[in-house]
Amino acid sequence: MSDSFYKHHVFICTNVRDDGRACCAERGAQRAQEHAKKRMKELNLNGPGKVRINKAGCLDRCDEGPVMVVYPEAVWYTYVDREDIDEIIREHLQNGRIVERLRI
Amino acid sequence: MSDSFYKHHVFICTNVRDDGRACCAERGAQRAQEHAKKRMKELNLNGPGKVRINKAGCLDRCDEGPVMVVYPEAVWYTYVDREDIDEIIREHLQNGRIVERLRI
């Protein structure tokens, strides 16, 4: 419908649950978000026309978490560690290749 | 690239700034997000294949705020009051028509 203000707009769920159910926050989501944001700045990839890394409230896919989603492509990922985040950055955000092994 | 898990995934900036610069939070963003989320439930429009209303951290378009973005369409809006939110819900989320007068 329109050009996207950000080429890739990444939302990382950093939600904290109080009800005992598993949440992204307790699975390293905050660290993942901070790391991804820092990497974008190092790569000079952050900003309009490029990439924005955002925190988000509960994306409601907790059972598959921790989760993130990349728009406007609407590609969802889960991740375990920093290497996974780095692979998503290198493959998807830098080179436009979806990382199928981390896709949910 | 793929079907979107949510038909419309709405991110409403509810960021609070501590540095004195204008932020969405002080312009009614929290109330707007709660209202939109409630309306989606009332309309039975919330959930996979339908609509998700999310809180988000700073979307970095503060000067045009308060802001929200609807993906995967990548349509950005500002809003002043509840009537604006209701118009976006009725026109865009229920009927797929972009509200040009609120678009940024």
Image: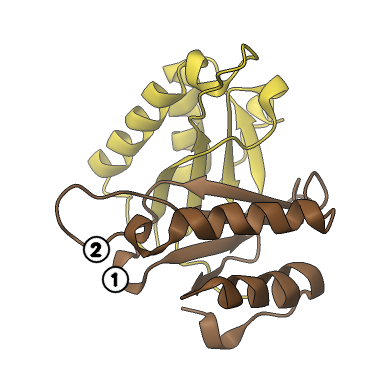
Chain colours: A brown, B yellow
* Mark linked to residue A63: 1
Q: Given the current orientation, which residue lies at the most extreme bottom position?
A: A101
Q: How many neighbours does mark 1 have within 10 angstroms: few (below 14), some (14-19), or many (20 or more)?
A: few
Q: Residue at x 54, y 88 (%)?
A: A101
> Residue at label 2?
A22
Alpha carbon distance from label 2 to label 1:
8 Å
Q: Residue A72 in the image: x percent, y percent?
A: 65, 59
Q: Amino acid at mark 2?
A: Ala
B62, above or below B41, in the image: above
Q: Residue A71 in the image: x percent, y percent?
A: 62, 59
Mark 1 belongs to chain: A
Count of numbered circles on the image: 2
Q: Residue at x 62, y 39 (%)?
A: B98
A22, above or below A88, in the image: above
Is residue B65 shown left or right of residue B87? right
Mark 2 belongs to chain: A
Q: How many neighbours does mark 2 have within 10 angstroms: few (below 14), some (14-19), or many (20 or more)?
A: some
